[in-house]
Amino acid sequence: MSQPFLYFALPDIGEDEIAEVTAVLRSGWITTGARARQLEDDFATYVGKGSEGPPLHAVAVNSATAGLHLALEAVGIGPGDEVIVPTYTFTATAEVVRYLGAHPVFVDCDPDTLNITAEAIEQAVSKKTKAVIPVHIGGLTCDMTGILDVAKRHNLKVVEDAAHALPATHNGKTIGALASDATVFSFYATKTITTGEGGMVVTADPDIAKRCRIMRLHGMDRDSFDRYTSDKPSWAYEVVAPGFKYNMTDIAAAIGIHQLRRLPSFHAKRGDMAQRFRDALSGLPLIMPAMPPAGDQHAWHLFIVRLTSDAKLNRDDFIRAMTERGIGTSVHFIPLHRQPYWRKTYRLDAKQFPHAENAFKGAVTLPLYTRMTADDEQRVIAAVRDLLG
Ligand SMILES: *Cc1c(COP(=O)(O)O)cnc(C)c1O
């Protein structure tokens, strides 16, 4: 008796999301409008909750990649600048630096957390360094205290790639509410909440928020919703820069409004599942994902394990065997220094990144998402134990 294939990830879309999307479709206003505004307000409130910092601004965009581009542009990154990024991440983190004619400077990861470290950043700083993009891999918060300290001493802008980090915290503060210049979240289909495609820039700096709002819509000083709802004539706007087309539709925002409301229950479920995986998979030749220090909360977007060198199977064979058992897995990440474009353009050598190389060799991400049933979970556990025990 064969079971259906267990996908590596699935979105968790409820009837409330579907009803809200239907209402948007029937309303006649399907692009950026009242729902996008509402999602921005709800998101800023969510991230700012419990922190006594300045009020936060949230800018909804059509992807985190767009959001990272906007944030870097808004903090003033331009041609010839250097921006420090981890090699252990998705290519979007580095490609946005190239969009602006600037150069990513790749650094190795911490061998335990897989995150970029304050020390690695400090060693990579040059006269041209203008910014750093920390990435909270899998949802485990970077040492933001250390990173913000290095950034302050070297006058670097900090734009967090928080694509995995909703809802993660550092020292009790929600990611997005720290002292970084901007923090960017992803609502891609596999992330902890989704809008199909989408993202959010969060910042405490009103000037950065304003610049992102203008640049996400053609560099126009008023978006069309503002034009049709204010008393100034709706045809009047000024183009103040050659902007982009990065706005979020109300169709997408309608999904996001309900996904955000469900985030606490999604997160509780992910955390419980991660704990059960850790317990059930202990004693195998596997390195479990690092746990957050006291005061930090893991978002549990990804459950990344690493096969040790004494495991019966290597990583590639393990993935093949899992697929044969009908279980999807993934690899986070193929380090950027291994990708042809980055390797050739910046003459990168694997020897510069020993920790990322070592982590990549054994890394495999197990399925962990809210639509998994107790049976699905047991299937994953049984397959891993069978293959590696
Ligand atoms: C998913 C992801 C992104 C890009 O998010 P999009 O919303 O798909 O643009 C950026 N960085 C990291 C680390 C990611 O995993």
Image (cartoon, grey):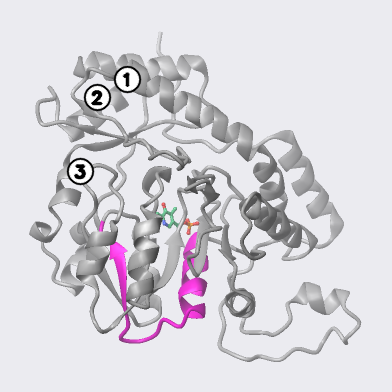
Report if residue 133 is visible in the image. no
Tell me if label 1 and label 2 are in contact, CB under 8 Å. Answer: yes
Residue drawn at point x = 69 percent, y = 54 percent: 45
Alpha carbon of mark 2 to alpha carbon of mark 3: how far?
Answer: 20 Å
- Circle 3: element type: helix
**Which of the two labelled residues, at mark 2 and mark 3, occupies the earlier sequence position?**
2
Query: Which residue was labeled with disc 2?
Result: 321
Q: In which quarter of the image is residue 367?
A: top left
**Stretch in magenta:** 64-87
Query: Which amino acid lies under the numbered mark 3 shown in the image of this protein?
Result: Ala
For label 3, the residue is 359
Q: Name the residue under label 1.
A: 325
Task: Residue 332: name its quadrant.
Answer: top left
Of the two numbered discs 2 and 3 in the rendering, the one whose residue sits closer to the viewer: 3
Magenta stretch: residue 79 in it? yes
For marks 1 and 3 on the same chain, the one whose residue lies earlier in the sequence: 1
Residue at left 30%, top 42%?
A: 331
Q: Is the residue indicated by label 2 positioned so its CB lies within 8 Å of ligand 1?
A: no
Which amino acid type corresponds to the residue marked 1 in the rendered image?
Arg
**Residue 146 in the image, given as x and y percentages of width and height:** 34, 59
Q: Which residue lies furthest to the top in this view?
A: 1
Q: Does the magenta stretch include residue 70?
A: yes
- Residue 188: horizontal and vertical position, in percent? 52, 51
Residue sitting at 74 percent across and 81 percent down? 222
Q: Is mark 2 on a helix, strand or loop?
A: helix
Q: Residue at x 24, y 74 (%)?
A: 125
Amino acid at circle 2: Ala
